[in-house]
Structure formats: structure tokens, C-alpha cells
Amino acid sequence: MENKRNVTEFILTGFTQSPQMQKVFLLFLVLYLVILSGNLLIVITITTSQALNSSMYFFLTHLSLIDILYTSSSAPKMIVDSLHEGCMAQVYVEHVFGATEVVLLTVMAYDRYVAICKPLHYTTTMSHRLCILLLGVSWAGGFLHSTIQILFIVWLPFCGPNMIDHFMCDLYPLLKLVCMDTHSLGLFVAANSGFICLFNFLLLMVSYVVILHSLKNYSLQGRRKALSTCVSQITVVILLFVPCIFVYLRPVTTLPIDKAVAVFYTIMGPTLNPLIYTLRNAEVKNAMRKLWRTTVTSEKD
């Protein structure tokens, strides 16, 4: 019998099947507001501070913007639990921002490598032109990854049911509803999403090993400053890449823990990023204090 595509809408059950989990929607709302305020504060602080003009802060600004966009692609609809359409669009948008952030974190690791291992050439190597180019490569990589992926999925025959046991549209929950063999599709997802996460994760770990090994030539104060920056970025890398590898580098299957893992990398990661980058960075904290004093002074005047 020929498979027909007779399902065009998908209903996300989210956490509604679990009365206990329904009670945490207020927590998700608070976390989402923290994500918006924290990342916007970083963007405003860096763009208004003349002291934060290095390439690291240029990339950090765009990382904060991506976190806002990435979380906003799923969190608001998860909170109100009312997403009934636009499933394919959500998959596309999620993977654009997710893949862009993956590539951007690799770019930021390269920036740290040049700053720590080749400090005398840092200014000339990480020119504004190169930063714009690397940022463009990050966005192009995100769009290319997501476009290739959605072109394979959008034509699949979905024969029902149309209930997705998740709070957002994602690849494996969607593939469970396809009325054909999905083994080859699972290999494609692993190669396109899983391998990208694994490859960039290994590349990042190697780069940080090289960076940490080079710190032996630094003074004690220099080692502490460089180590503080690297630890912050390694923490962000682990928060994003470990769930990504767990979710996508496996056969087509869904697990009960998938929703909790998805909450972690769509909500918790972007929530912690501003804290990780500000609490361990004296320059950003000083710029925020200056911004606060300027704002309070202008209000008094």
C-alpha cells in the first residue's frame, strides 16, 4: 500500500501528561525571563563599554543573542503549552540557532587559542574583518545544517497519530510518526546532527588541552586569568555538547529522559551562560558596574 501523507499538524503533549511536571511551568517562566534579562544585559554592557572591544567580547555578544533566539524558539510555547502547528518551522529554527551556537563556540575557542598561545599576534590575527568572517561562517553553517536536514524530513509520509510526547518538535519524536522504515534516516540524523556535535566537541577539547598545556610558560597571575577564561568556556561547552551528543548520536529512538535533557540544553544552558561569563570575568563585571552607575546618575539628573 502506498504511504500517504495525511498528517499535517502535530500536537505536543509536553508535560501535560505528568501532573507533577505541570507545576514547574512557573519555574520555566522565571528561567526564561532570567535568560532574556541576563543575556540582554551582556549585550548592552559590551556594546556600550569602550573597554570591552576585543574579539572575545564581540563573539560573546553574538553568543548571547543566539541564546536569546534559540531559547525563544521553544520556551514561550513550552510555557503556555499551546503549540499545535508550525512543527517543521520550529525544527528548522531550533537547528539553525543550535548549529550556529555550536560553530560559534568553536570560533571562540580559536579566539582564546590565539590570545593565550600567540598573544603578540592576537590583535593583528583577530582583526575585525576576520571576526565578521568567522561570525558569517557560524551563521552559514547553522543555516546549511538546518536546511539540509529539513529538506529530508519535510517530504516524509506522516500517517498518524499526530501526538508528540514532547514539549517541542524535534527530529526523533517526529521520526517516530513516520510510516516507513526510519533506519537510514536515523543514520542521516546521526551523521548530520550527532557527528557535528561530536566533531566540534572533540575539536574544542583538543584546543583547550593545547591552551592549558601552553600556560606553563605564563606567570602565576597570567595562568590564573587564562585558566579562569578557559574554565568558563569549557563549562559552556559541556552544558551544550554532552546533551547534544546524547540526543542525536544514537539510533532512532526516544527515551523518557529526553524531555529532561532537552530542558537542560534549551533552558538551563542559556540561563547559566550569562552567569558563567560574568561572574568569572572581572572586565565584564566592572563594565556592568560602570553601566549601572551611569544609568543611576542619568536617572537622578
Image (cartoon, grey):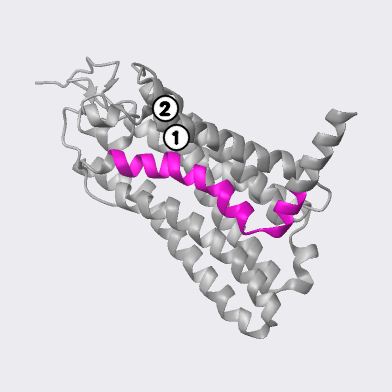
**Main secondary structure found in the magenta portion:** helix
- Seen at 56% across and 60% down, the residue is 232
Query: Residue at horizontal 31%, vertical 45%?
Result: 188
Give how far across and how far down residue 222 sits, in percent: 70, 76
Q: Which residues are magenta?
A: 259-287
Question: Is the C terminus in the top left, top right, bottom left or bottom right quadrant?
Answer: top right
Taking the view exactly as shown, the residue that stands out farthest to the left is: 1
**Front-most of 247 and 264?**
264
Task: Provide residue 101's location: percent of width, then percent of height.
Answer: 53, 46
Q: CA distance from mark 2 to mark 1?
A: 6 Å
For residue 24, which quarter of the picture? top left
Q: Residue at x 39, y 32 (%)?
A: 150
Residue type at mark 2?
Gln
Callout 1: 10 Å neighbours few (<14), some, many (20+)? many
Name the residue tied to disc 2.
90
Q: Residue at x 26, y 47 (%)?
A: 187
Residue 15's x, y, as percent?
Answer: 27, 28
In the visual, does 299 lie left or right of 152? Answer: right
Query: Which corner quadrant holds the N terminus?
Result: top left
Q: Circle 1 is placed at which residue position?
A: 94
* Image side of residue 220 versus residue 85, left or right: right
Instruction: Let me know if residue 99 appears in the view.
Output: no
Above or below residue 269? Residue 160 is above
Q: Is residue 272 above or below residue 154?
A: below
Looking at the image, do the residues carrying marks 2 and 1 touch, with CB atoms under 8 Å apart?
yes
Residue type at mark 1 is: Glu
